[in-house]
Image (cartoon, rainbow, N blue to C red):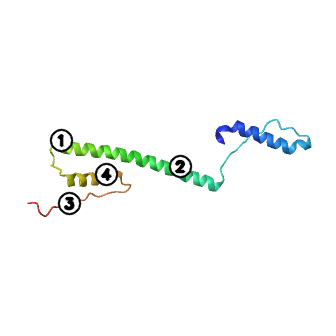
Amino acid sequence: MRGDLDVVADSLGETIQEHVALAGIEIIQARIAHLAYAPEIASAMLRRQQAAAVVAARTQIVEGAVGMVRLAVEQIERDGIVRLGDSDRVRLVSNLMTVLVSDSETHPVISVDKGAS
């Protein structure tokens, strides 16, 4: 409706003209001065817009975090900082993604292997 106000205004003018023609009144022009959704519709549309914005933001955050994790793992392995087995790599990726994507403050989890000497 907002995108085609001229068509709506013409239709409004014709409708008003039909109702006032018997009184001899001629409608030359009709325009909508203010267009608003009913409160319950406006509220639902606002929630929908907010949800779409949250999804878009979270998508961008996840994409950035995946890139950062990929770079971190590649650099750790390339520089020989530590040798990562598959389970170590999974744990590192999981911890990094948790820290980078979380909405709240996170704390790293450090695993201590009792079998190491």
User: In the rendered structure, which disc, 2 or 4, sits on the residue that comes first in sequence?
Assistant: 2
Q: Label for residue 91?
A: none
Residue at the spot 59% in from the left edge and 54% down from the top edge: 43
Determine the CA span between mark 1 and mark 4.
20 Å
Of all residues shown, which one is farthest toward the front?
86
User: In the rendered structure, which disc, 3 or 1, sits on the residue that comes first in sequence?
Assistant: 1
Determine the CA span between mark 4 and mark 3.
17 Å
Q: Return the x and y of residue 96 as percentages of the image width and height.
A: 28, 51
Give the left or right position of residue 109, taking residue 58 as reference: left
Residue type for callout 3: Ser
Residue at the spot 46% in from the left edge and 50% down from the top edge: 54
Of all residues shown, which one is farthest toward the left?
117
Q: Which residue is mark 4?
A: 97
Residue at the spot 43% in from the left edge and 47% down from the top edge: 57
Q: Return the x and y of residue 108 as percentages of the image width and height.
A: 26, 57
Q: Label for residue 111?
A: 3
User: In the rendered structure, which disc, 2 or 1, sits on the residue that comes first in sequence?
Assistant: 2
Residue type for callout 2: Gln
SS category of the residue bearing label 3: loop
Residue at the spot 33% in from the left edge and 47% down from the top edge: 65
SS category of the residue bearing label 4: helix
Determine the CA span between mark 2 and mark 3.
42 Å
User: In the rendered structure, which disc, 2 or 3, sits on the residue that comes first in sequence?
Assistant: 2
Of all residues shown, which one is farthest toward the bottom?
114
Give the left or right position of residue 105, taking residue 40 as reference: left
Q: Label for residue 78?
A: 1
Q: Which residue is mark 2?
A: 49
* Vertical order, 22 against 51 (above or below): above
Residue closest to the eye, 10 or 65: 10
SS category of the residue bearing label 1: helix
Residue type for callout 4: Met
